[in-house]
Image (spheres, coloured by chain):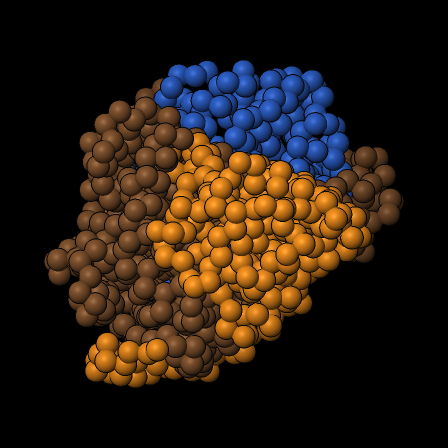
Amino acid sequence: MSHPKSVHPHNAEARLEMLTVINRAIAGAAPVEKPAYPRPQPLSAAEREEQFRDRILDYRAHYTRVPLAELPQAIAASLGRAQRVLVPAGIPADWLPAGLEQLRDEPPLSHAQLDRAEAVVTGCAVAVSETGTICLDHGAEQGRRALSLIPDLHVCVVRENQIVQTVRGAVERLGLAVRAGRPLTWLSGGSATSDIELVRVEGVHGPRALHVIVIAE
Amino acid sequence: MSGLHPKAPFPKAAEASVNQPQLRANLRKVTHTIRAKRAAVVAELPYWEQLRQLGAATKDDSLVNLSDRLLELERNVQARGGQVHWARDAAEAREIVARIALAHGERELIKVKSITSDEIELNQALEEHGIHAIETDLAELIVQLSHDTPSHILVPAIHRNRAEIQALFNAELPGEGGLSDNPQDLAAAARRYLRHKFLTTRMAVSGANFAVAETGTVCVVESEGNGRMCLTLPEVLVSIMGIEKVLDTWEDIAVFMETLPRSSTAERMNPYNSFWSGVTEGDGPQEFHLILLDNGRTHVLADEFGRQTLRCIRCSACLNVCPVYERAGGHAYGSVYPGPIGSILTPQLLGMHDKNANSLPFASSLCGACYEVCPVEINIPQVLIYLRNEGNAHKGPNAESLAMGAARVAMSEGWRWEGALRLARLGQGPLVRQGEISWLPGMLAGWTEVRDLPALPREGFREWWKAREGSRTVDANTQAGPPDIVQDAQNRESPPANVQEGGHPPAGQHGQEGEDHA
Amino acid sequence: MKVDLYLTCVNDAMFPRTGQATVRLLERLGCEVRFNPCQTCCGQMHMNTGYREDALVLARKFVREYEHAEAVVMPSGSCAAMVRELYPQAAQWAGDDELLRGVQALESRIFELSEFLVDRLGVTDVGAYYPHRVTYHPTCHAARMLHVGDRPLQLLRNVRGMTLLELEGAEECCGFGGTFAVKNADVSAAMLADKTRHIQDTGAEACTAGDNSCLLHIGGGLHRLRSGVRTVHLAEILASTEEEVFA
């Protein structure tokens, strides 16, 4: 996939000079000791779920917690009247409400087609209770990045055992995916800006609504 | 955009801005609001100080191994199908971006807010090649449409109010004209304008908040979703990063994902963080270029003390607590890096011989608020003091340095100092009216513009002390021992409880041994 | 206890009453106060204005003159911070190991006045009487470099006859910053304007602090405004008694 022709011959010269200057600058520098990562008091699973809910609501996103059996109804409720719902290939069939008008990314949809979708349903890789963050690693239950970006409503299903307490915990769980070269998207509430007089406006370019559904275990 | 080079010395630029009511009001509001929010979210983490230390050490570790880290990053980005370019200065970086765009025949590209791209003045350079760069961050779009420059790292258009933005969008955005001044409406207009651009533009340019050497991963943090759009939808992506942004391992990213959002937007986490490693087949841009930019950073690196500036993660917490920034505003700093961090970073990148930039280290009362909030423990006040010395060294002898030298000589011996004080008491005569001085000449005139100065007293402490010493023997005999209040305190457990309430330990060991007046 | 009073150059030149008050107060609390007439200046002005070599001359002088002191008390947070925080750093910049060792040996015996009273003497009620309405400005270097915390407030809350009024934006710098006040006179004036406004809003007769350089600045502004509010050093309030009210 690479296009070596666009790397200019000057690049080698710049690279060599920069590395030389850097090596001179850091010559003899003492090695740095990194202190241990601080960890908070661990929360129980119930406390984590409670904290996660609190954070999600604080971001003014929607939050529901249901047993697996009621997931289809919960998804249907979140979707409301949305038509043309994107469903990544790996979403288990028993998650979905009957009669849903599904849009599949096989073969890959064009940007224009994606733009006509009104909602997307995805799973996630891991979630963080302390910050209310949902991490996608764009595996089969989440689909490629564009799917969860372009539609205006994102319904994201989180299994309870995917909720970890800390950012550090999530980073550790994501290590395998990153080392396999997968991209990540972290979502903490919906798209927002405070660029005009520091007034918070929700829903700029990303999905304007985020619905989080936790499967109770 | 002015890039890095201030066009005027700080005091001259600030003279104009302190008297702009709208600017002062906006700045007061934004700085105080974010200040309070930040304090609240930081207080949620009882181990915040440990996170700061870890963040500082993580950055230092990368800096002292920088060449290895960059080579590892290059190797891993290439292994995942990306291309890596090295740029010694702004011009080289600009040329690389332009060349990539021209190779694809692109005349228009979309941009994620990137201070690094502003530092190298990328947009103007692209225009010269006939390539139009569209800023997609709301504030950057406002700044771009009004041919203005950013004034804050996080909220670049904070010097603009809603009425100004309303007029601008009604005039400049195609199809608009009837927008209200409601921020919701204005943001919606930006969404309408940009959505089509996101879906159809084939090339994007971004900065990078972090890069991970071990995995070749680049990270961009943002709020609006314009970042995700630019990083995901185009076919070609070019990311420009300062060489100091590289981290060692994937796990190193964690501490910054905790400290950056809380310090920056004062949120537990900002809405969107994107991470990608080279090219992912079937997902996102299929051509990825990473530009590693020096542009003065290696000079900063070479300075063992000043090197700590390169830890900066561009959170802007120091701006929001700085009393100077709050009153002078970002433009007074004349660089894309304003506020306390700009006061050290700009002159360090340019070198202290730049006569406008070297006024920046003096643009601080050394109150220390910036250091207190810095998530990577950059001791900005000490670096300022360090740079002031460097700056003076470049200036050579002048009235101020001669006065300082004279003061040092007078202060080098007690008897000289006493003599100097006596002389000053005599010499001040013509300036004193009713015990106050309301006008001073030359370098000191700035003081008496808005302040009076009490006249030196006719008799100083030394005269009082000497007179007292004369009759001292009698006094000393009447002082039998400490009063009860102190004896009580000394008989208590050490230290007394009220000391511990203070929150910080005393400076030294204050045991009760050595008390000699039992 | 033998205490060396380090008066500081600003007090030496301009505020003899602060020195006198410190002596009275410490003696009242049973200390034997000494004043070394060789003292001049800690070098803070030189250091903070970027004249490190000049400052180092004064730093070496200080360490030489006080290396055997039992306790050095300074009625100034910024001078104590200079010695404890900046001397070691300046010694490292200059590669002066002898100075560094000297400062490190001396550091724990350097006290800002409120630290000395609260931590070393263990006293928060010094038996003071001051029948005025007063507001307190925590100075930057005492707060952020020395971390004196609420020690001055603990002392002030125990002063009889005094009404202590809370100051809005107390922790914000007054805009002095040494030569900053003249080099960046406009921004400094803007900072001072907010500080004097907040002080006047309290309705206090006087503003106190632990550092006369900041009070020189604040007081200069209040006087220019003809506000009728004066400044008074913490030591002068604490030294005041029913028999003799200072200032």
Asked whether, in this view, residue B284 is left or right of residue B166, the answer is right
Front in this rendered view, residue A118 or B324? A118
Q: Drawn colour of chain B?
A: brown
**In the image, B57: left or right of B406?**
right
Q: Residue at x 22, y 41 (%)?
A: B145
Q: Residue B513: horizontal and vertical position, in percent?
A: 81, 56
* Residue C86, visible in the rendered structure: no
User: In the figure, the orange chain has which letter?
Assistant: A
Front position in the image: C71 or B428: C71
Which residue does the image show at 51% across and 76% down from the upper left?
A: B214
Q: Nearer the viewer, residue A158 or A47?
A: A158
Task: Count every numbered label the image shows and give the total.
Answer: 0
Q: Which chain is assigned blue? A: C
Residue C78: give x, y in percent of width and height: 52, 46
Which x, y percent locates residue B54?
A: 59, 63
Q: Is residue B103 left or right of residue B278?
A: left
Q: In the picture, residue C122 is in which quadrant?
A: top right
Q: Quadrant of the C terminus of chain C?
A: top right
The answer to whether residue C29 of the structure is visible from this angle is yes
Residue drawn at point x = 29 percent, y = 41 percent: B193
Task: Tell me the quarter of the picture where residue C32 sits.
Answer: top right
Give the quadrant of residue C193.
top left
Q: Position of residue B358 (x, y in %)?
A: 28, 55
Name the residue: 57% across, 54% down: A122
